[in-house]
Amino acid sequence: MTSSFEALLPSTERALLHRVATAQAEGRAPSLVGAVARDGRLRWEGGRSCVDGHVPDADTQYRIGSITKPFTAVLVMRLRDEGLLDLGDPLEKHLPGTSVGDVTIAQLLGHSAGLAAESPSPWWERTPGTVRPELADVLGERPLLHPVGRRHHYSNTGYTLLGSLVEAVRGVTWEEALKAEILEPLGLGRTSTQPVAPHAGGWAVHPWADVMLPEPAEDLGLMASAGQLWSTASDLCRFAAFLAEGDERVLSAETLREMRTPAVPPEAGNWDGGYGLGLQLVRSDGRTLVGHCGSLPGFLAGLWVSVEDGVAAVVLANATSGPLPGAVAADLVRIVADAEPRIPEPWRPLPDVDPALLDLTGPWYWGTYAYGLRVVADGGVELCPLRGQGRASHFRAEADGTWTGLDGYYAGETLRVVRREDGSLSHLDLGSFVFTRKPYEPGDAVPGGVDPDGWRGL
């Protein structure tokens, strides 16, 4: 017998509303909306407003600032998956004529290209894109501030270059590529480059008085790919589910896992945060959150998804400063994941298994370290230490009979079965490490040989 748990518990919903209401009141935001999705579906939404009768809902548009960057990164990764570019390619190969052509596409995606964070004056977020009609205007006279590839330094100019890269390779505008390749396939009909009613207006709230000032909403021109988009909590929850699970119409689950993997070391002192390929990564309350935060004058936004829990949260506000949508969204994930933990799928046996593969399961020894090998779904295997912490990894089956490591110490390494001349099983070779059925099993498999007198007591 199974039960449906689509709706959240009333106690959970009240805790979510309390967190959103507290954020709007303490952050002094003209309005704030939050939404939570679980297993890819919107489960809760709640909003607060300073104007009676104008409470925002999950269909109200807000400007999302740098949450635009994951959208741009997805477009770039699609080009990679189609074989139109390589992440190791220098920018010059596909977008010639810039003053930073030696930086690689991967470095731009992970903010390790050494580029300046912002374009030269005037402040790009509060001025029209016509002020910067060319990439040279965006980059300025001193575009590189750090050695290329050596450190993470967040760069809006880098994502401007990536937007222009998409246009150069696709032969269409960044906006056209965005609509055709992401928004339409994923059904994000309320995400756009310009506001579409109902939408919030952007406000600045005075830091020392409860008064407000309207903020301008400029078209960012070339820098649109770094922060132009408007969206809703509902659309962003759907996008968060895509970031967790993938969608073959846009990007595979394997490519999304790659994007969620840290691309560069975090900055010193920020060991609980990192950056993948277009995605921010944080550790919060013992869980890993993936997503992005964003801001533009008049707006703040936060999107996080816990892949392990299957829970995503989005928080949007129309204030230049005050509430902390990233922190609030993380709290919304925690509230749901802790109060209503994910119910695992029923255990089911594999539909079939190769007897030769089954023969490989069981204990193996790397020297005196005991490991266990077991078969998992899709013909893959996992190798885990039997005691304590160790080098555990999952492996994907390859057509040539080998396996490729997917995670942990052995990510990318090759696991292969070595057989004797008579076809019997000798050992496993994992990146030159030898795993035998017995600890230091006599024979020719163990590098350096085994003492002929064998094991002995004191």
Image: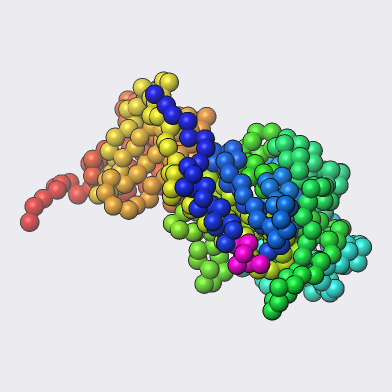
Residue 453 within the magenta-colored segment of the rendering: no
Whether residue 164 sits left or right of residue 112 in the image: it is right
Identify the image quadrant of residue 49.
bottom right
| Residue appearing at x 72%, y 36% in the figure | 187
Q: Position of residue 389 (x, y in %)?
A: 32, 53
* Residue closest to the eye, 4 or 409: 4
Tell me the quarter of the picture where residue 176 sits: top right
Q: What residue range appears in magenta?
A: 23-28
Task: Give the residue at x 73% y 48%.
Answer: 60
Q: Quadrant of residue 244?
A: top right
Q: Residue at x 63, y 67 (%)?
A: 27
Residue 42 visible, this angle:
yes
Main SS, magenta region, reads helix
Q: Nearer the viewer, residue 4 or 229?
A: 4
* Quadrant of image for the N terminus: top left
In the rendered image, residue 200, in percent from the top left (x then y), is placed at 77, 55
Tell which of 225 and 284 is nearer to you: 284
* In the rendered image, the vertical position of residue 262 relative to residue 187, given as above or below: below
Position of the C terminus, as image quadrant, is bottom left
Say if residue 80 shows up in the picture. no
x, y percent for residue 224: 81, 56
The outermost residue toward the left is 458
